Amino acid sequence: MTSTTNNGEEKIPFWRDQRFWRVALQVAAVVLVIILLSVLFRNLTGNWTRRGTRFTYSFLTNAASFNIGETLISYTPNDNYARAFLVGLLNSLRVILLGFIFTTIVGTVAGIASFSENWLVRQISRVYVEIVRNTPLLLQLIVWYFTVFLRLPRPDNQIILFNSFYLSNTGIHIPWPSGSLLTWLSVLVLIAGTIVAFMLWTWRTRLIVERGESGQPQLIGIGAIAVISLLLLIFGLGWQIPQSPSSGQVQGGLRLSSEFCGLLFGLTFYTGAFIAEIVRGGIQSVSRGQWEAARSLGLHSGLVMRLVVFPQALRVIIPSLNSQYMNLAKNSSLALAVGFPDVFSVAATSLNQTGRSVELILIIAATYLLLNLIISVVMNQLNRAVQLKER
Amino acid sequence: MTTVPSSSIAPPPSARSSPATWIRKNFFSNWFNTLLTLLILAGLLWWASGFLNWAFTQARWDVIPKNMALFFAGRYPAAQRWRIWILFAIVLAVAGLTWGTLVRNTPKLLTRNVLTWVGVAAAITILLPVPTQTHIILLALEALLLATAWIGHRVGYKIPNLVNWLPLIWGITYVLTLWLLAGGFGLRPVSTNDWGGLALTLFMAVSSIVLCFPAGVLLALGRRSDLPMIRGICTAFIELVRGVPLIAWLFIGKFIFPDFLPIGSPTPNNLLRAIVVLAMFSAAYLAENIRGGLQSIPRGQTEAAQALGLNPLLTTILIILPQALKISIPAIVGQFISLFQDTTLLYIVDVQELLGMANAVLANPEFLGRRGEVYLFIGIIYWVCCYAMSVGSRRLEQQMNTSR
């Protein structure tokens, strides 16, 4: 406990020694946390022994015996709780992934629109951001669900757009690839085509820049890939168009339930407003000289944004985007409020049935922590890719 | 399609442009813009006609005035509702005072902008479909806000130190609020089960803010500490809290928290648990915002303070923290705004705040299917509160920007 001294120096009392306090403070903090945790744990075990329960995950293999409205994999109430969670998790992932895509589009468009030459576009972007950011997300979700998607006409009176979109208050049917072997093959070919086209494009740019060649052959190659891709997109995927054999019934295509649509739209437009602000800030951070230089090269303003400013703004945008994506993932747990069976709402139902609160909350916490970790790792990779490469 | 960001461009030449050229430049500068303008105008017209048609022919607005008391005070006993009004009056008076003192350096309080907003607020108040008595009270409250702001502006100009007393004034207001809501000491006690509506929303938000602020500062300092164990504990806490959705924490507060209490001890009340959860959640986020501010303080500040002989504690309290907090004001207010919005989640764990009250009203068979009207109404309330906070924070930021 006494402070260490150097030879020949007068010993300073330990309470004046910073080294002592550094150690003492840390020890105190750790001891405090351990005491707190052990007290909480003892209370918990005490309460549980009194009630005659103990920590166990054995209920996971019991039959869940509740139905789940929409599932990506087969599920019946006879299946066990573990499978119910899997169904919920897949539903969550569906909302989250689609949410990422749509919210990025909405946010980027709204962010760029705030620099538009058109006064109306600028004002609409501003009003959108101000309204959405200053009202609670839960209210927005409820409004989307109850006053937009549940207000659609009843199935026997549904809205039909272009003979292929069927809108009613039970859900929306849209054309969707059939999912046969041909579809998957086409998807593979499309992905391969994209990669080849991208490589051709970089090759062409290099040839034009370094050797001053025309790049005509490569352009023809890219054009050919584009034509093939277009044909595959139209015919190869095997689009299923929803059909309505009798009134109120729709077959084929993909059915998106009202709950799913409400949640997806709410999350998309809410997070989109935040992303719009991030995009706006990022664009503003690009210096004026970049705009002027690009304009003086004769690029028109759309091209300036796309080729010069936006890629530079990405460096500022991507780190903040990370936390917005995490927020979207966490906010998807509000699915409970609109009755969409995501992992949280499945867990909440299970909690009501089994009373296994601690075990279930641990599952939920682990799920979301893992999700956030994955998002963070992916976004950091992306961030590394767009950062300025200096020696 | 796009222009140079306005903030980074030199001001345009001062040649006055006529409205016609302004319209041409902003709406019809080229074919693309013209098309965009026409499309948007068509869309806006379609939407506006639909909305107005709904608002004036289909919507039945009587659900709002009939339930005004529920929206604002929940199931608070009718005989005691004057206490809520007084509470609102006190809060508004202190808010006005704060506003006035914070803008004390501006030459005029009632700029055209402010007057426009006052006019709009008064007009909306008069148009609200409520009994005349409520009209008068609401107008009086608005007048009170303006009057106290004016007084604050005047007095603040004379006594610049008044700003330093604001936290104390707010502290007293908080205690007063609690006393008015709960009763006791001569007032009839009202159980927390009867608190509700906007009053409860505000109470929950303010209580959580009061609790989360010191916790957030401590967590941020802990995370920046050079003591590895303390840093580790704080980091673990912050990451754990931020990694799990708020609604899961609220479930923990509701279902598990009682299990962690000593055996046989009474369960703390629902509101208290919710406040603790909200505060803990916000503290973790706040800590990250404040950490940003702490990181932006140059190391020279610490070194200078040490050279003066200040110990680490005093260096932090006197030199680093004030600067860091000033820098992070926008982020902190942003966090408070989202905390205010997050109070809506409490309705999922059976706290009858504003959204919960709205749903309770909608569950009444008499008002079935009036969701649009009710949600629009409470949406406007939330919007006004949050927008006021964000405008206030922007002003505060400008006021405190003394560095240049």
Image (cartoon, rainbow, N blue to C red):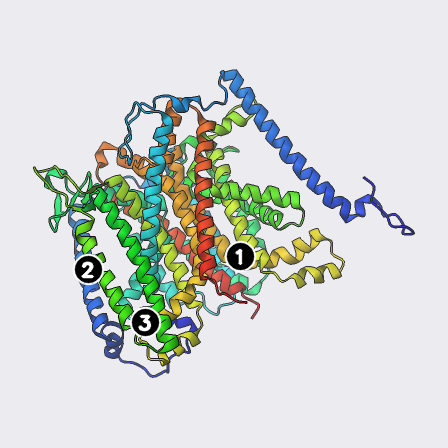
Q: What whole-number distance in Å separates the C-alpha atoms at marks 1 and 3?
A: 36 Å
Q: Are marks 1 and 3 on the same chain?
A: no
Residue under label 1: B328
Residue A170 picture location, percent across and down: 19, 38
> Mark 2, chain letter?
B
Helix, strand or loop at disc 3?
helix
- Earlier sequence position, callout 1 versus callout 2: 2
**Image height check: is A10 above or below B119?**
above
**Image height check: is A69 above or below A97?**
above
Badge 1 vs badge 3, beta-carbon distance below 8 Å? no
Residue B401 picture location, percent across and down: 54, 65
Left-right relation of A357 to B40: right
> Mark 1, chain letter?
B
Q: Amino acid at mark 3?
A: Leu
Q: Which mark is residue B75?
A: none
Q: Quadrant of the N terminus of chain B?
A: bottom left
Q: Nearer the viewer, mark 1 or mark 3?
A: 3
Residue under label 3: A303
Q: Amino acid at mark 2?
A: Gly
Q: Quadrant of the C terminus of chain B?
A: bottom right
Q: Residue furthest left?
A: A246
Disc 3 crowd, CA 10 A, few/some/many (<14, 14-19, 20+):
some
Residue at 40% of width from left, 67% of height from top? B111
- Camera sees residue A319: yes
Q: Nearer the viewer, mark 3 or mark 2?
A: 3
Q: Amino acid at mark 1?
A: Ser
Left-right relation of A104 to B176: left
B331 or B272, nearer to the observer: B331
